[in-house]
Image (cartoon, helix red, strand yellow):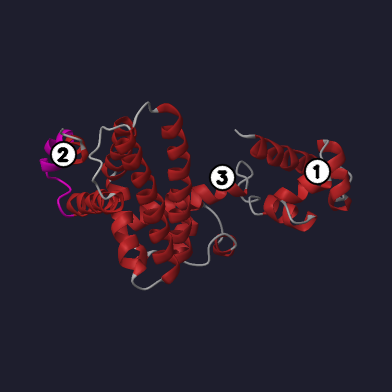
Amino acid sequence: MDKHEMIKNRIIAVAKEVLISEEGNSFTVADICKKCKISKNTFYKHFSSKEELIKYLNNGAEHPEYGAENMTELIIENAKKLVFEKGFDNLDMNELAAMVGIKRTTLYSYFSSSAEIAQYILSNELKKREIFEQIVDGSCKDSIERLNSYIDYQLKLIDNEQITRLIIEMIAKASKNENIKNRLIGIESFTTNNLMEFIECGKEEQVFDSSLDSKINASLIYMLSYGITIYRYLHPNSDTLEKLKPYISSFIINGLKNNE
């Protein structure tokens, strides 16, 4: 847990204690800051006001064990199950609320539609890729290892039949929703930029052909991952992909290598 999360969790914990004490809703931002031993500026980095903090706490009231962030994840996990079974277009918000165990009105305080749920999932995927990129950047010794890590990430992603269905549903929904389309493009842009960096580093290391067009090859690798996803969706019970997996990484890397 990073420092930002630790401070936010401390604010939430102190606010909960204050709300059940004699002070109740009469507490001020200054009271919370004093108890947390933080400045008001630090508080406002996490919550815009006392009211927002109270709303944050109340949003999880029907599930005392869940704060707002955990409740969001609970909703998303159940939404994924429904999308896998029925698709985004048939995602029923009443059914989703019942699965989570909250009222429909509470659900709408988090997400107003299946499109908003899709946008959240895509934004979260981008965050995951940003974290993954940092890990790869700090742990891999060379460009080939970094590229192998990316390929493994993509293959593990589509190993999950639920995620494969989600990706296909997102692509279909993008034709009707500009926000979803833009988020998909954002993931594509982030991923291809990283792939371009891997390839450029490989050229500097003289393991990849110096004449390679990094942008074209990065786009090609990304498109290949889409193709694999579609194949996985169309042939969920086929063992062909499993047989091909050991060759995918070498196929891509050999196409980039400097053979001189």
99 w.r.t. 202: above or below: below
In front: label 2 or label 3 = 2
Q: Is residue 209 visible?
A: yes
* Residue at screen point 39% across, 55% down: 189
Residue 51 drawn in magenta: no
In front: label 1 or label 3 = 3
* Residue at screen point 43% across, 60% down: 183
In x, y percent, where is residue 190? Answer: 41, 51
Residue picked out by circle 2:
251
* Residue at screen point 35% across, 50% down: 192
Q: Could you say whether the residue bearing mark 1 is in a helix, strand or loop?
A: loop
Identify the disc placed on residue 70.
3
First reached walking from the N terminus: tag 1 or tag 3:
1
Q: Is residue 92 visible?
A: no
Q: Amino acid at mark 3?
A: Asn
Q: Are marks 2 and 1 in contact (CB under 8 Å)?
A: no
Q: Amino acid at mark 1?
A: Ile
Q: Amino acid at mark 2?
A: Phe
